[in-house]
Amino acid sequence: MIRSATLFTGMIFFICAPLGAEDYALTFEKAVHNPVAFFGTAPAEAGEKGTGWIDGDEFLTKDAQSVIAYLGMGEGQNAALLLSVDTKADGADKPDTLYIDLNRNRTLDEAETFPLVLVDNKGAGPVMPFTLLCAEKVAYHDEYSAGGGPFHVNFYYPIIDDAPPGFGTAFGLSAWGCYSGRVTLDGVAYDVTLEDRTVNGSFCDFDSGSHFDCDSLEMRRADQEKALTGLTPPSPLRRKMLIGDRAFGVTVKENGRVLALESITVETGRVSTSSSDLAVNLSHPDWGSFPIEAGETKALPAGEWTIVDYSRVKKEPSSVCYYSAPTDKSVSLAGGESVCLDLATTLVAAVTATPRKGLVQLGLAMTTDGGATMRGFYSEKAKGRGIPFHITNAAGETLEKGTFEFG
């Protein structure tokens, strides 16, 4: 457990007038195209005794590909679902039709045929390294969801031109709609987006703190553009959150139609790092994840925080080394206390050699004295190619040199 080195004078609180809970109405609308996850498939055997279509497969062309998709979310959780991807239009250069056995009777029924359209996913982050097709607004089941409204999803089919050998077909899934609105706090406007990240028709799945199996709630200042990056995951829906310099209890009512924020007072401490080039990501089951940038001191609610990962950032020459799985993961932060995180960044290399058919395969493990492992490295000079190595014998003569490539 990492403890503080010094105390700062006084106590820091998020202080605000006791306003009580305030309700904000949200509007259901189309969400940005963004697959929550991709799920693997298995080939579908055709015929009466197989797992393919019993009736209706005459509508498929000879180019159709039928698979069993194992979806891990929503009403189809851990259930196998029969899908077929087909190219119906003459001269089409990519699939344009998706058949989904929504009622699981292995018969191609009416309303189980959907057009596949090309997704412009620029609004959801960096352009994905493959072509992404989508069957939009599919009614995932005939009945209304537990939240009292129809439950629609998007199915995604990626086309990877340079797929490695053995790479199988996959399907993505996301909820079609989200709830959005605007909240004004202390004269500052925030755009709110509540997403059904569990893809089950509910917008009330709060994070349990164990893993990201919950919905998400984004509160972004309206005067700031959204950063288009796939490296930053959405904020999990939690019972408490920090907005600006205030703390709030969070309640979702009417399955997403109403967001209630209750102003609360929270005791805090300050967290910094021992070096101007050390950055740390901290996480708390109630408050979520917070980055402590290199050279930064940040006020955080008191409690037990977990070090998710950290990095060492060099400006001259420009380089970043990423670390994960440190031995000391717990940070105990008391009210009015300053904690200075001192994490080992010096790496010790351990090389393994495995003979393989007359050759020797080398393996490289990089760890710190604190038990953290090297998760990645980038330098402007190396352009991300890898880590250079130089092997000598006992006499100091060079036997081999090269680069350990990442991945």
Image (tube, helix red, strand yellow):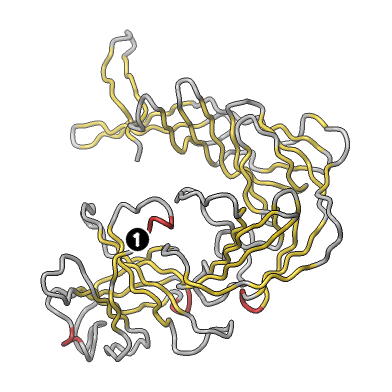
Query: What percent of the width, then of the height, locates residue 87?
Result: 18, 73
Q: Residue 91 sits in which quadrant?
A: bottom left
Image quarter in which the C terminus is found: top left
Which image quarter is the N terminus in?
top right
Is residue 152 depicted above or below 92 in this figure?
A: below
Q: Viewed as shown, does residue 245 lie left or right of 194? A: right
Q: Residues within 10 Å of mark 1 (few under 14, many from 20)?
A: some
Q: Residue furthest top?
A: 395
Q: Residue furthest right?
A: 10
Q: Is residue 341 left or right of residue 278?
A: right
**Residue assigned mark 1:** 120
What is the three-letter code of the residue carrying label 1? Asp
Give above or below for 64 relative to 225.
below
What kind of element bears circle 1? Answer: loop
Left or right relative to 252: residue 63: left
Q: Is residue 156 left or right of residue 163?
A: right
Q: Residue at x 37, y 88 (%)?
A: 103
Give percent across and percent down for residue 3. Answer: 75, 36
Residue 74: x %, y % from top left:
48, 75
Is residue 79 placed above or below 21 in the rendered structure?
below
Observer-nearest residue: 260 or 284?
A: 260
Residue 315: x %, y % from top left: 50, 24
Q: Quadrant of residue 114?
A: bottom left
Tell me which residue sits at (19%, 66%) in the image.
94
Q: Residue at x 31, y 14 (%)?
A: 393
Q: How many marks?
A: 1
Residue at position x 74%, y 35% in the image: 339
Viewer-proximal residue among 11 and 258:
258
